[in-house]
Image (cartoon, rainbow, N blue to C red):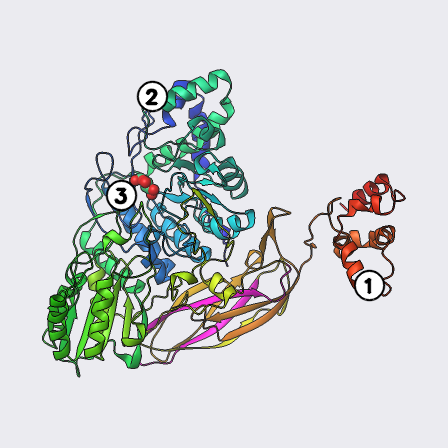
Amino acid sequence: MILDESTSAQSSVDYLSKARSLLAAMTLEEKALLLSGDGWWHTHSIDRLQIPAISVSDGPHGLRKVEGGGLPISVPATCFPTASALACSWNTELIRQVGVALAEECQAHNVQILLGPGVNMKRSPLCGRNFEYFSEDPVLAGKMAAAYIQGMQSQGVGTSLKHYAANNQEFERMVTSSNLDERTLHETYLLAFEIAVKEAQPWSVMAAYNPINHLYAAENSLLLRDILRTQWGFEGFVVSDWGAVHDGVTGVNAGLSLEMPGSGDYLRNKIIEAVRTGRLSPAKLDEAIVPLLAVILKAKDHKRSGVAFDAGNHDGLARRAAGESLVLVKNTDGLLPLDFRRIKTIALIGTFAKTPRYQGAGSSQVNPTRISTAYDELMKLVGKDAVIQYAAGYTEDGATTNELINEALQLVKAAEVAIVFVGLPGSYESEGFDRSSLDLPAGHNQLIEAMSTVQPNLAVVLINGSAITMPWAEKVRAILEAWLGGQAGGGAIADVLTGRVNPSGKLAETFPARLEDTPAYPDFPSRSKEANYGEGIFIGYRYSDARKIAPLFPFGFGLSYTTFAYSGLRVGATSVKETEPVTVEVKVKNTGPVAGQEVVQLYVREQHPKVVRPEKELKAFTKVALQAGEERTVSFRLTRRDFAYYDTFRHDWVINPGKFEILVGSSSRDLPLRETITLEVTQQDCAPLSRYSLLKDFEKHPKGKAFYPQLAEAFGLGKPDEADMAGRAFLDDMPVYKVCAFSEGKFTEQMLNEILKQVQ
Ligand code: BGC
């Protein structure tokens, strides 16, 4: 089910009333003071009213508490895998536990809000900040974010869901307008935010830098008030991204509560003046203050002193999280896990094995409590079972030389198995700029090609924050996508290579075969300050499905050291009223030799949609642990929204009656089970009729169809069998108000208005 509103925390209700009472005692100056930060990381305190300052710090995959402004070194904190890795675990319970651990570290460091998670969609794999985002699919991203928020907030520490909204490129991110239609906005770019807000009520939402359809996110009342608060019921406050406010008064008018970083007296004076001149009404000012004040009061109550966290435990959790996030995408003839009964010599190649890249650069960069390298951890786990010999293969910036290649090849030739670590150096992907290509550094590709000519037993371990191309994929036996796995990522890689952990991650993003196969190609990043989302709702697998493009590795795909079989798909009923939930059950069996976990994925497809729809869309998933030979039944519950699309006439989610397929399986391209259900729509979901409706719209409308013959006749349309097809099509497609002109005035405006009244 994409939306489970029953889980939403309602605890802020009391704080909202408390905030309202306190508000009555505040002066205009005090209110204005609260609306912008005190420096980079605090809100203002008002001692007279015992309103404390609260402290916010970056995340999302670890605490980055800095004392000054900008990006200096922060306090040591556990660096968990980044979001692009975590999402591949598809394990909401695990993400919740990471949230709990993050909150403990925040409590220990007196931080009340961690600035994350980020749920922006991966419109293009080139976005430099994709490592900080979960997925190309809004349901997966929304569910991950909800679990993260619930975990953190269960410990009394707030979150800031970011970057709201349609913040999908880094190049000129402060000014490039994301231009998209209403349906694309709701179905693709807002849905993850909607799920997280409705299911987990983050304490705050961060308004993005970019304009949306030319209106800055932090000043956009459609986004901040109408959608976030009115439609979704958001109770927290909106904070600007750091530097995203252009006109603070417009921001507050639109629903912004906190400008960050603080601007000294600058915004305060403007707010005071705006209230005095009537540009900002006292009511709007209060509307902005109340949710912020409510969170400040809540944070004050939930602050715990003397909290210390167990860095060792958290490192263990980080290793487990990284282990579940690794995705094995190729493993011909079971090269992995390494079988030490047969393998006695291993060549370990690649600087990343010893000097790992484990997180991305920018505001999310955590100062880890410790770092494990794959080299050290493999040495420990392999022990005396085999001899491991290491060569760098390339330099830290990704270049290679004949000398480095030859040194590596000596070891690779002599060993029974070679493992090469390659990926994207820090200079290739970062907050603040986008990637210019999907390729690995040329030196890395060269090294793999050279190794593949001398060693058939070659495994590639990838370290990168977003999808890459693999021109050598056919020439190697195994490929393990290890992402930016956090401080314990090296240990997790060693766990999977040696079979201590059975890989269970599935790709949370499509790996295209080439850049030309991506939805925003060739205009990404847009360099004209106008990012036109021409591909609409078709991003990620929705795009490859629609264009019938075979990706290198599809969304949802990942191998295990065991195998799973699906059977027994059952739906509660084959004909269902739209208001009733649809229950789905499926059996999954571990048919291989070892215990493992499988991510069961459920997609929905409308058979004959009236509007263009993706071929299928992910609506539910679950991760199930199975012993060898064990079988379990997993169940899902689908509701109305799982079948609906966003209708721009009604500005709402709509279902058309008809047949829908429920597809279940192990990846977006491997869905062996399928059942069809018929949805009966009780309230006929038809666009309301107006004078601009087409003649044929009347024929289909429950109330309008009674008037169709009369209107058709007045248009001069004969009986259906007498009409020629072109003539009929011509008149059927006429806006109905033209009936007056076509009937040469015999059908009057008054008669038309009478009909329009009756069909409402
Ligand atoms: C980033 C945010 C971050 C903020 C504070 C901004 O540049 O976009 O994600 O939370 O800085 O460091």
Question: Judging from the image, what secondary structure is the residue with disc 3 in?
Answer: helix
Vertical relation: 34 (above or below) 383: above
Which quadrant would the C terminus be assigned to in this image? top right
Is 141 or 237 nearer to us in this picture?
141
Q: Residues within 10 Å of mark 2 (few under 14, many from 20)?
A: few
Q: Which residues are magenta?
A: 582-610
Q: CA distance from mark 2 to mark 3?
A: 29 Å
Name the residue that disc number 2 marks: 265
Question: Judging from the image, what secondary structure is the residue with disc 1 in?
Answer: loop
Query: At 32% from the left edge and 34% from the top edge, which residue is drawn?
Result: 300
In this picture, residue 184 sits left or right of residue 380: right
- Image marks 2 and 3: residues in contact by CB distance under 8 Å: no
Name the residue that disc number 1 marks: 724
Of the two numbered discs 2 and 1 on the same chain, state the one appearing first in sequence.
2
x%, y% of residue 294?
A: 41, 33
Is 100 or 509 nearer to us in this picture?
509
Which of label 2 and label 3 is nearer to you? 2
Of the two numbered discs 3 and 1 on the same chain, state the one appearing first in sequence.
3
